[in-house]
Image (cartoon, rainbow, N blue to C red):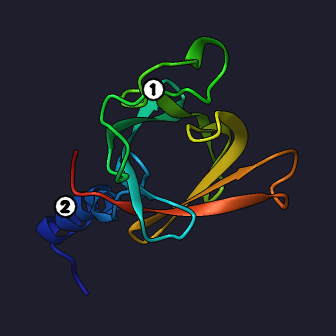
Amino acid sequence: MQISKGLIVMLFVFTLWAPSLQAEEETPIGYWETTGDDGQTSTSIVQIFQDGESLSGKIIKITKKGIKPDALCVACSGELKDKPIVGLRILWDMKKTGDGWGSGFVLDPDSGKIYKCSISLEGTNLKVRGFLGISMFGRTQVWRRAKSS
């Protein structure tokens, strides 16, 4: 059986090109609608972005009823005390770990508390787990992918 040179060249080119056909790895980079503890009430839109070797996130819009767009983080302490909530970095140092991202931190602007954090994608949802010490002692919020700011 004889194989033409053209077929060999096509197979070689396809072999080089085929890996680029694989779907890009899903990433949490983008816009997310956060919810209250009830999992239903929209509270804000967070933008997650690449920050050097890790991911960070900041609030770009407040959607929670009764909270003014110019609200300040009165519960925060230190340099974050009384900073505007819109523009506030609430997620930082998130590094890729297996199926998700971890070793980072999340700020709860309602309480002003900072927790260790891990995040993982599940379809169009982002599971955000904040905890003290070990992950078993924490809580998870589910954020939904938002179309844009």
Q: Which of 81 and 60 lies nearest the eye of the viewer?
A: 81
Task: Say whether residue 21 is left or right of residue 127.
Answer: left
| Residue furthest out toward the right | 133
Q: Nearer the viewer, residue 4 or 28?
A: 28
Label 2, label 1: how far apart the Cα atoms are: 63 Å
Residue sitting at 44 percent across and 71 percent down? 40
In the rendered image, residue 90, in percent from the top left (x then y), is placed at: 53, 35
In the rendered image of this protein, does residue 149 appear above or below residue 22?
above
Q: Tell me which amino acid carries mark 2.
A: Val
Three-letter residue code for mark 1: Leu
Report the quarter where the C terminus lies: top left
Q: Decide: is 8 above or below 129.
A: below
Left or right position of 118 against 123: right
106 left or right of 89 in image? right
- Residue at the location (57% across, 64% down)? 37
Mark 2 or 1, which is nearer the eye?
A: 1
- Where in the figure is residue 69, as x and y percent of width and height? 30, 35
Residue 77 vs residue 45, the one in the foreground: 77
- The single residue placed furthest to the bottom in the displayed view is 1
Neighbor class of circle 1 (other Cα within 10 Å; few <14, some 14-19, many 20+) is: some
Residue drawn where x is 72% and y is 40% of the image? 115
User: Along the horizontal axis of the image, is 84 left or right of 39?
Assistant: left
Dots 2, 1 in contact, CB < 8 A: no
73 and 116: which is toward the camera = 73
Task: Determine which of the numbered discs, if any, sits on residue 72 in the image.
Answer: 1
- For numbered disc 1, what is the local secondary structure? loop
The N terminus - image quarter: bottom left
Of pointers 2 and 1, the one earlier in the residue sequence: 2
Q: Which mark is residue 58?
A: none
Q: On the image, which quarter does residue 38 sit in?
A: bottom right
Residue 45 position, x and y percent, is 35, 47
Tag 2 residue: 9
